Image (tube, rainbow, N blue to C red):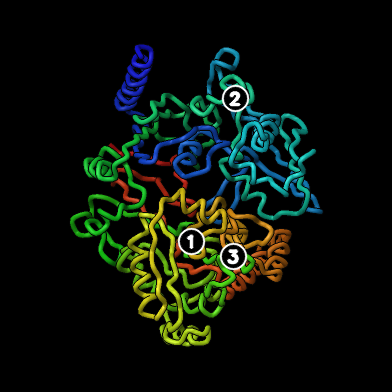
C-alpha cells in the first residue's frame, strides 16, 4: 500500500509540475487545453480505440497513413502519396521521411527514432494478431490478403494488397485502429502498452493517474507545419479529467476550468438553449455554441427474420404494419421539444446527413402522415388497431423519455406500444442474439463512407452489425456492386439505391440524424468540429 501511495503522490506531483510549468510559459502555444471524460479512458493503445473516449486521446498521440481533409476529402498524413493498381487490389503508399516517434527510454539514447514502412507493416499485422485480440481486427476481414497483405517494400514504401476491390479501404485506413506504433516499445511494455503510449502524433504522453487526470504535452518534433511554416501544434499540452458527475462537469465549465463540453446533458439543456437550438440570452457572448452534422443515426429496429420463433407469429413481420409505424410519429415535433432542435428529422434513408453520398432528393423516407399510417394499419389487417397485440420496445435509461414520448404517438395511431427500460449491456445481449423484436438503436460511423451504414443490412453480416437480420438478395447485389466501384459518383448512386430499397422494406424506424453539439469557451480558437466528432487540436489556440 505504501508503494501505491508513493506512486500516486509522484503522479500528482508530475501532473502539477507540468501544469504550472506550462501555465508560466508565454510562447505562441498558449497553455493547456482542458476537457473532462466522464466515462473514463480504458486504454491509450490504438489497437483498442473502439469508442470515442479512447479515440480522442489516441488521435493526439498517433498518426495514420491517411486522414480526413475536412469532412469529405482524403489527404496524406504519414503517407505523402499513393497509387492504386489497375485491378484495384494493390495500394502503394509513399511515406514521409521526416517523422519520428516520441522520445522513449526503449530507443537508443532515449531519443525517438525515425518511423519507417516496417512500422506500418508491424502495426497492421498486430491489429489482426489473435493474441492481441484487438476489437479492430474486423476492419481487414474479407478485404485484405491474409498471407501477403501488408508489406514494407523499403524504408519509405508500403504495399497493401486486397483480396477483392474495396473502394472504402482508404476510409478504413483513417480509423485509429490503423495508427502506427513502434514494435520495440510495444514489446517492452506488452499488455501495459495501454498506459505507456508512444506514437508520432502532435502530443506525447506525460502522466496518467486513472480516475484523476491524464496529461499530454506538445511534441516539439512534430512533423506538420501551418501555412506560415510554424510547427504544429500551438498548444503546450492537454489535461483530461475524469469526473463522473455531469453536474460537476457543467459547474467546472461555468467556472472556466474546462475549455469545452461535448454535448449538453438533458438536465441542463433547457437552461442553456431555446427550443430552436440557440443560446439563451444569459449565455450569449459568454460561450460559443458549435453544431455540425454528426455521422450518427438514431433509430428503432425491428427483428425481421421470419424464421425466428419470436417473429413467426408476430405482427411485426407484416411490412405494412412497420410502414404504418414509420408514418405514425412526428419526428419534427420530437426534435423540437426533446432535442431543442439540435438534430435533423430522419426523413430520408438510414445513411445520415453529413455523409458524402447523402441526398434527400434521391432517397425518400417516412414523415408524419396520420392518414397514411391509418390506411396502412387497416391494410395490415388491424383497422384502427383492432386485434393488434401490444408491441414491446426495448430501450436504455437515457432514451426512456423519448421511448415513452413516441409510445404515446403510436397509441394515438392505434398501435399499442409498451416501453421496457433495460441496461445497455442487456440490450446489446438481446439484439446480438436476435431476442428483441423491437428495440432502440444508434449507429455511429467508424469512417466517412456509407458502406459503414449499409453493412448493417447486408445479409452475410452477423449481429452486430445486422441486428435486424434483414435479408434481401436485391439489396445484397447492389451493396456488393457498390463496394467494388472505384468511381465515387457511381458508387454513391448505388449506395442511394440500396438505402432506398431497405427503407421501403422498413426494418427500422429512423428517428433523427445527429449533430455534434459543443459548448466552447470564448478564448478558444481553431477548434473546429467534424462529422466524426473527433477531437482535433493541432491548430487550436487559447488566448489568455
Label 3 crowd bin: few (<14), some (14–19), many (20+), radius 10 Å: few
Query: Pointers 2 and 1 in contact (CB under 8 A)?
Result: no
Q: Is tag 3's residue or tag 1's residue first in the polypeptide sequence?
A: 1
Label 1 crowd bin: few (<14), some (14–19), many (20+), radius 10 Å: many
Q: CA distance from mark 3 to mark 1?
A: 29 Å
Residue 58 visible to an observer of this rendering: yes
| Mark sitting on residue 297 | 1
Q: Is tag 2's residue or tag 1's residue first in the polypeptide sequence?
A: 2
Does dot 3 land on a helix, a strand or a loop? helix
Residue 232 visible to an observer of this rendering: no
Q: Which residue is mark 3?
A: 309
Quarter occupied by the C terminus: top left
Does dot 2 land on a helix, a strand or a loop? helix
Residue 393, above or below 526: below
Q: In the image, what residue occupies the spot 61% across and 30% down?
A: 98
Task: Please state the horizontal and vertical placement of residue 346, each as a whole percent of the image.
Answer: 46, 69
Q: Quick one: 278 or 344, which is closer to the camera?
A: 344
Foreground disc of the pair 2, 3: 3
Q: Is residue 306 left or right of residue 406?
A: right
Q: Is tag 2's residue or tag 3's residue first in the polypeptide sequence?
A: 2
Q: In the image, what residue occupies the spot 66% across and 30% down?
A: 119
Query: Pointers 2 and 3 in contact (CB under 8 A)?
Result: no
Q: Which residue is mark 2?
A: 186
Q: In the image, what residue occupies the spot 37% across and 70% down?
A: 407
Q: Quick one: 49 or 262, which is closer to the camera?
A: 49
Task: Please state the horizontal and vertical placement of residue 134, each as a whole percent of the image.
Answer: 60, 37
Residue 454, located in which quarter of the rendered image?
bottom right
Residue 528, above or below 8: below
Task: Please state the horizontal and vertical placement of residue 281, each as a whole percent of the image.
Answer: 19, 59
Q: In the image, what residue occupies the spot 73% across and 37% down?
A: 158
Amino acid at each position: 500500500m505504501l508503494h501505491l501511495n508513493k506512486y500516486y503522490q509522484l503522479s500528482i506531483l508530475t501532473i502539477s509540475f507540468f501544469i504550472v510549468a506550462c501555465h508560466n510559459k508565454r510562447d505562441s502555444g498558449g497553455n493547456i487545453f482542458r476537457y473532462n471524460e466522464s466515462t473514463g479512458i480504458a486504454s491509450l493503445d490504438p489497437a483498442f480505440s473502439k469508442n470515442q473516449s479512447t479515440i480522442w486521446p489516441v488521435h493526439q498521440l498517433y498518426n495514420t497513413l491517411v486522414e480526413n481533409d475536412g469532412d469529405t476529402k482524403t489527404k496524406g498524413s504519414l503517407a505523402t502519396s499513393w497509387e492504386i493498381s489497375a485491378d484495384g487490389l494493390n495500394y502503394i503508399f509513399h511515406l514521409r521521411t521526416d517523422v519520428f516517434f516520441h522520445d522513449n527510454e526503449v530507443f537508443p539514447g532515449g531519443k525517438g527514432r525515425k518511423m519507417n514502412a516496417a512500422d506500418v507493416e508491424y502495426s497492421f499485422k498486430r491489429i489482426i494478431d489473435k493474441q492481441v485480440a484487438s476489437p479492430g481486427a474486423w476492419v481487414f476481414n474479407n478485404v485484405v490478403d491474409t498471407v501477403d497483405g501488408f508489406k514494407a517494400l523499403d524504408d519509405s514504401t508500403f504495399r497493401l494488397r486486397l483480396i477483392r476491390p474495396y473502394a472504402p479501404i482508404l476510409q478504413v485506413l483513417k480509423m485509429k485502429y490503423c495508427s502506427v506504433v513502434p514494435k520495440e516499445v510495444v514489446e517492452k511494455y506488452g499488455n501495459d502498452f495501454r498506459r505507456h503510449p508512444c506514437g508520432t502524433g502532435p502530443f506525447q504522453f506525460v502522466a496518467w493517474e486513472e480516475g484523476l487526470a491524464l496529461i499530454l504535452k506538445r511534441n516539439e518534433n512534430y512533423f506538420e507545419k501551418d501555412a506560415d511554416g510554424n510547427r504544429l501544434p500551438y498548444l503546450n499540452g492537454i489535461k483530461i479529467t475524469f469526473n463522473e458527475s455531469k453536474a460537476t462537469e457543467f459547474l467546472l465549465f461555468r467556472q472556466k476550468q474546462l475549455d469545452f463540453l461535448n454535448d449538453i446533458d438533458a438536465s441542463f439543456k433547457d437552461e442553456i438553449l431555446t427550443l430552436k437550438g440557440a443560446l439563451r440570452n444569459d449565455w450569449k457572448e459568454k460561450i460559443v455554441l458549435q453544431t455540425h452534422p454528426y455521422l450518427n443515426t438514431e433509430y428503432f429496429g425491428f427483428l425481421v427474420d421470419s424464421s425466428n420463433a419470436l417473429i413467426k407469429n408476430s405482427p411485426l413481420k407484416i411490412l405494412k404494419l412497420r410502414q404504418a409505424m414509420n408514418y405514425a410519429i412526428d419526428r419534427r415535433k420530437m426534435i423540437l421539444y426533446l432535442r431543442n432542435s439540435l438534430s435533423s428529422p430522419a426523413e430520408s434513408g438510414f445513411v445520415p446527413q453529413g455523409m458524402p453520398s447523402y441526398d434527400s432528393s434521391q432517397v425518400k423516407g417516412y414523415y408524419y402522415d396520420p392518414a397514411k399510417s391509418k390506411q396502412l394499419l387497416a391494410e395490415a389487417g388491424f383497422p384502427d388497431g383492432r386485434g393488434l397485440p401490444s408491441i414491446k420496445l426495448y430501450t436504455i435509461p437515457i432514451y426512456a423519455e423519448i421511448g415513452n414520448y413516441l409510445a404515446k404517438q403510436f397509441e394515438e395511431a392505434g398501435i399499442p406500444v409498451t416501453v421496457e427500460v433495460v441496461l445497455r449491456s442487456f440490450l446489446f445481449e438481446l439484439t446480438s442474439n436476435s431476442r428483441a423484436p423491437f428495440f432502440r438503436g444508434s449507429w455511429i460511423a467508424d469512417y466517412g463512407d456509407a458502406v459503414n451504414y449499409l453493412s448493417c443490412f447486408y445479409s452475410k453480416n452477423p449481429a452486430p452489425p445486422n441486428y435486424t437480420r434483414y435479408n434481401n438478395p436485391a439489396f445484397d447485389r447492389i451493396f456488393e456492386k457498390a463496394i467494388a466501384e472505384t468511381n465515387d459518383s457511381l458508387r454513391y448512386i448505388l449506395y442511394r439505391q440500396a438505402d432506398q430499397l431497405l427503407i421501403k422494406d422498413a426494418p427500422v424506424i429512423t428517428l433523427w440524424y445527429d449533430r455534434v453539439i459543443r459548448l466552447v469557451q470564448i478564448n478558444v480558437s481553431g477548434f473546429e468540429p467534424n462529422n466524426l466528432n473527433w477531437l482535433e487540436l493541432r491548430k487550436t489556440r487559447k488566448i489568455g
